[in-house]
Image (tube, grey):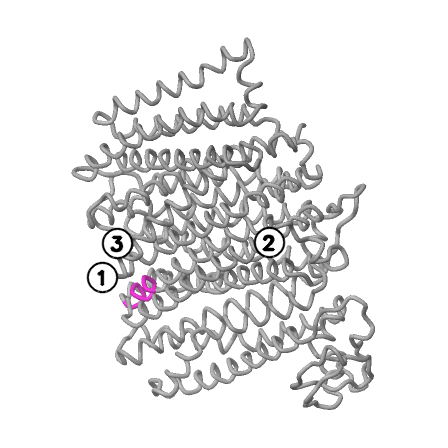
Amino acid sequence: MDEALVLARVQFGLNIGFHILFPSITIGLAWLLVVFRVRYERTHDPAWLGTYRLWVKVFALSFAMGVVSGVVMSFQFGTNWPGYMNKVGNIAGPLLAYEVLTAFFLEATFLGVMLFGMNRVPGWMHVTSAIVVAIGTTVSAFWILALNSWMQTPAGHTTDGDAIIAGSWWAVIFNPSFPYRLAHMLLASGLTAAFLVAGLSAWRLLKAPGDAAAHKTLRFGTHLAAVLIPLQIFAGDLHGLNTLEHQPAKIAAMEALWNTEKGAPLVLFAIPNEDQKRNDFALTLPKAASLILTHQLEGEVKGLNEFDDRPAVTPPFIAFRVMVGIGMLMLLLSWLGTWRLRKGPAPRWLLWSFAAFTFSGWAAVLAGWLVTETGRQPWLVTGILRTADALGDASGALLGASLTAYVLTYAVLLLAYMVTITHLAGKGS
Amino acid sequence: MDLPLVFTALMGISILAYVVLDGYDLGVGMLMPAAERNEQDMMVASIGPFWDANETWLVLGIGLLLVAFPAAHGVVLGALYLPVAAMLVGLMLRGVAFELRIKAEGWHRELWNWLFWAGSTLAAFAQGLMLGRYITGFHGGAGYWLFSLVVGASLCGGYVLLGATWLVLRTEGALQAKAIAWARWGLLWVALGVALVSLGTPLASETVRAKWFSYPRILYLSLLPLATLAAWFWIWLSLRKSDWKPFAGAVAIYVLAFGGLTYSLFPYVVMDRLTIWDAAAHPSALKFVLVGTLIVLPFILGYTAYAYRVFRGKVTGGGPYAAPK
């Protein structure tokens, strides 16, 4: 790979990775805010008002981070990947346009009412605004996941001369991997928000053990996570089986299976050796990969040797293990927490555990996106467009200079964001 | 139906809406250092409920460029790589600084105030630079760059004028008096900028020169500068007498300048290289988006109007996130 391609990918990956952090929070948190706001409307308990007003601040900040990094992305499609729009613009463009039209304006406008309108509009209208914002964030995810899934498993398109166009928009949007990916992402967002709320509430309780609102939100976040995580494991399994059907090379890379086998072992850990096409230091569980992927002990799993176009093994292999590992820890902590909170106030070790897991959702989301995006390589749109063919003519030097500016900006913003929300939660208002 | 033409109109409306709407909040950001601390809070409060939605018009405008003219999207954004990156860094800094300054105390607050100003200024200047490069068809050479720098500086003046007249509309008392003075400086800056850019544009582009200076078109065309001049005087004379007229006048100047620009560029989407018909996407994509746009746009306009109605009137000292009554 040449320098410009690597830099363009690093820059875009950095930006898209930075961006996804904030929607991961806001999609889930928007619905939590609806719950908090409705509970206040019903009970007029000031603890719920305080809760709402704390978390709406966190939401506003996360939303602003999402907006600004999203604006960057809408430009980087053109600056970094002009070939992408040239080739599949007739499909990608309309899906992005529908996101802006049906979701962006809705969220941004009603967020204004939500944040600043509490004493200007009637209570029911304020509740409605919160619901509209939550719907907006979910609709936004719908369109983006439709486009991303189409890039993974294209369907419903046809050609007219040289142009690739939609034959059936229904088939384009509801392409084979879309329902699984959407469910997986929405659940991920719910989990990210649940651990954020539980973690920051735990942080508050470490500082002010008597805070009634923080007790409520710790329990709420813990219970929500305990319910969502088994659903997520189930959805993830379905998503994996769907990937095996439509993108077998990605599964082979995720599992570091170099050769087609019956009764394939599950590689728990290894250092993939790309040169020798084998795994070093492998720790394996016999026949487990066949069992998980085909639900049969002697089922055949295709190895990387079957595919001419295949991704590098190490990134999806490692990222997948990170994601699953964090998921297991989330399951353990949320169930342990639910059980322990039934017996009374949380002990300090539990509070510290939740505080440590505040941003665990981010780590899992990033790892998951790394799996699916690096696993799609060398394609940008599977079977249609290679990543290398979409590159623009920006020089390595230009990309390097702007990359430096982006890295600095993101580092400052991310640090400021994390410090600010931790500070807000710590003082509890 | 001529779909590329329809999308050119939609894209034009989005970009004009963006420039006017985000223009006033960028202008308010640029005016921050000129105000006292409590005034700064009021200035920020005046744009608080709107800035997110204002910025969305930029995403729509760029989204329509991407949807309707994919061939031009890559050319334009590739050629504008550096100013685009600068604008984006500016928009990010100011957007986040906006949220963080409310939550910060002490020197942190001063830092975010400064970044709010710096981000607003950087974004405004970079947008002007992009416009300048765009008009000149991305030609290299010192003269073209000088022209682009002048456009950048002029757009900053234009945003200051919009921001100041917005504050005249939304504030009262001492801050309003200050805003009136800022608006006068903004007017002078705009007058100089518009004059320089109007002189420079036909020099920088042969296509524009041919379009402007042909008889009898020049007779109708001269209505644009005359109307701009009238709007300018209207603002100057109404500054002490009316709250809303100066802002309306500033918007009128933008609409007129935008009209002149559209006339000069049409039918090119990349100056002298790609017309809107060369660069247009496939009709199937355009139809699909057009249907959605026609259904959704009235709703967007409706709830935008609702938001402006909810937050109408003068900003008071309560500040953002004020407690319910």
Most distant residue in the top direction: B216
| Left or right: where B91 falls relative to B9 | left
Q: Which residue is mark 1?
A: B106
Looking at numbered disc 1 in the image, what kind of residue is underneath it?
A: Gly
Q: Give the magenta range.
A: A47-54
State the predominant SS element of the stretch in magenta: helix
Which badge, 3 or 1, comes first in the chain's sequence?
1
Judged left or right of residue A283, residue A71 is: left
Residue A296 is drawn in which quadrant?
bottom right
Q: Where does the N terminus of chain A fall, quadrant-wise?
A: bottom right
Quadrant location of the C terminus of chain A in the rendered image: bottom left
**Dot 2 amino acid type:** Trp
Distance of mark 2 from mark 1, alpha carbons?
A: 42 Å
Specify whether disc 2 shares its chain with disc 1.
Answer: no
What's the chain of the residue with tag 1?
Answer: B
Q: Which residue is mark 2?
A: A143
For disc 3, the marked residue is B322
> Residue A234: within the magenta?
no
Which residue: 51% across, 55% down? A402
Mark 3 or 1: the one toward you = 1
Q: Secondary structure at mark 1?
A: helix
